[in-house]
Image: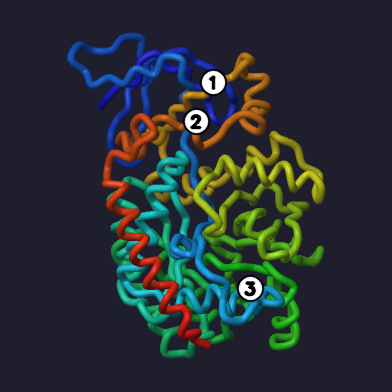
Amino acid sequence: MFFLKNATYIDSETFEIRNTHIAIQKGKNKDILFVNEIPKNATVLDVSGKIVTQSFACGHHHAYSALARGMDAPPKIPKNFYQILKYVWWNLDKSLDKNMIKASALATAVAAAKAGVTFVIDHHASPFALKDSLSIIAEAFEKVGVSHLLCYEISDRDGLEITNLGLEESQAYLEKKQALIGLHASFTVGNQTLRKAVKLAEQYDSGIHIHVAEDKYDQAYTLRKHKTRVIERLSAFGVLNFNKTILAHCLHLSDNERKIISKSKAWVVENIESNLNNKVGFFDGQKLEKQIFLGTDGMHSDMIKSTQAAFFIGQNFENINQQLIYKRLRNVHKYLNINNFEGDSTNNLIVLDYKSPTPVTKQNFLGHFFYGFSSKDIQHVISDGKLIVKDFEIQTVDEKEIFEFSKKEAEKLWSEMQNFKF
């Protein structure tokens, strides 16, 4: 146990402000205690003048995208979303090897930790380096000190042999760790694979993590191939029957599909910056509000940035306000806690060295969050009661060493991608 001295603690739900000392218990699913006195000889971190509040969780990430930053344009320039997947991301995931996966995961975990994100829900794909890929990611995340809920992106796009390997990897990992069953999207998953994935989720009391109607192509293909819309198809196969199911994106939905989701147990994750980057449309949470949380879709690991973007951009396309978008940010904690996933308790905290020319109060906290806060203000980060970032520096790993490793692996990846695997 250690103590935060002279904390200005802001409740992440009520915004109540308490000036107090905080006792922090180490370990998963532990609580914090507000105390009036600190015992002699205790380990103490003085946070006078700092803001302390709950850390963040990312509801949908792609850690394997970490090595894509700055890479050359593909040999064929994409003209639409399907071609973006084919020429960029499916080329990248086919080119990954185990060292690249490790480097991606380490770099992502460091970035997440320094942005105050202590829990990541990740969606991974590496069809030609599939075996043990989830364990490699888990080990990297845990080395940094970031909790996780992983899945492997099962898809028929590389053939049924790789599909089955994806199912086997998912099952093997579920024997050891908490996880979801990952599927790519309706248009790359056949009925047999969908059926097997749902059966596996039932067997392990898990859920499905899948991209849904991110682009109109998903709906058009599903209508043509399966004579039904995406959500109607997934619902018929039982995907929406799990409290743990995550539907990523959900941009191009009919009114009936929204009704089906709203009556289901499934959750929806918004990734507005990625949608803008891919020019696929704009998110609208109508009829789904209680089920929405936020992710980054591999664009970065900064949930403050994503939440601000969801508000600034989203108010042009849906009826939202600051309170509603902030609630979406925090809904991921409800998802994790309702489903009894480990690693997201009150002993996950951030300490912000936020210098403001105006007072921070319960009434104006959201004004500061949306117009003032930045991940660069995060001085200390506590994950599972352990100090993993201190004075803006990662404490658990050698960041310089990790980035040297990731740069070497990125160069290998970029070279490998020039072989153009289609």
Report the front residue among 154 and 215: 215
Q: What is the distance, in whole Å, between disc 3 and disc 1 at their CAs?
A: 48 Å
Residue beneath the point at 62% across and 77% down:
186
Say whether marks 2 and 1 touch (CB < 8 Å): yes
The residue under label 2 is 377
Relative side of 79 to 3, left or right:
right
Crowding near the residue tagged with mark 3, few <14, some 14–19, many ≥20 C-alpha atoms within 10 Å:
many
Residue 68 drawn at (x, y percent): 49, 64
Render colour scheme = rainbow
Which label number is shown at residue 234?
3
Which quadrant is home to the N terminus? top left
In the image, what residue type sits under mark 1? Lys
Label total for image: 3
In the image, what residue type sits under mark 3? Leu
Q: Residue furthest left?
A: 41
Q: What is the distance, in whole Å, between disc 2 and disc 3 at their CAs?
A: 42 Å
Residue beneath the point at 65% across and 54% down:
273
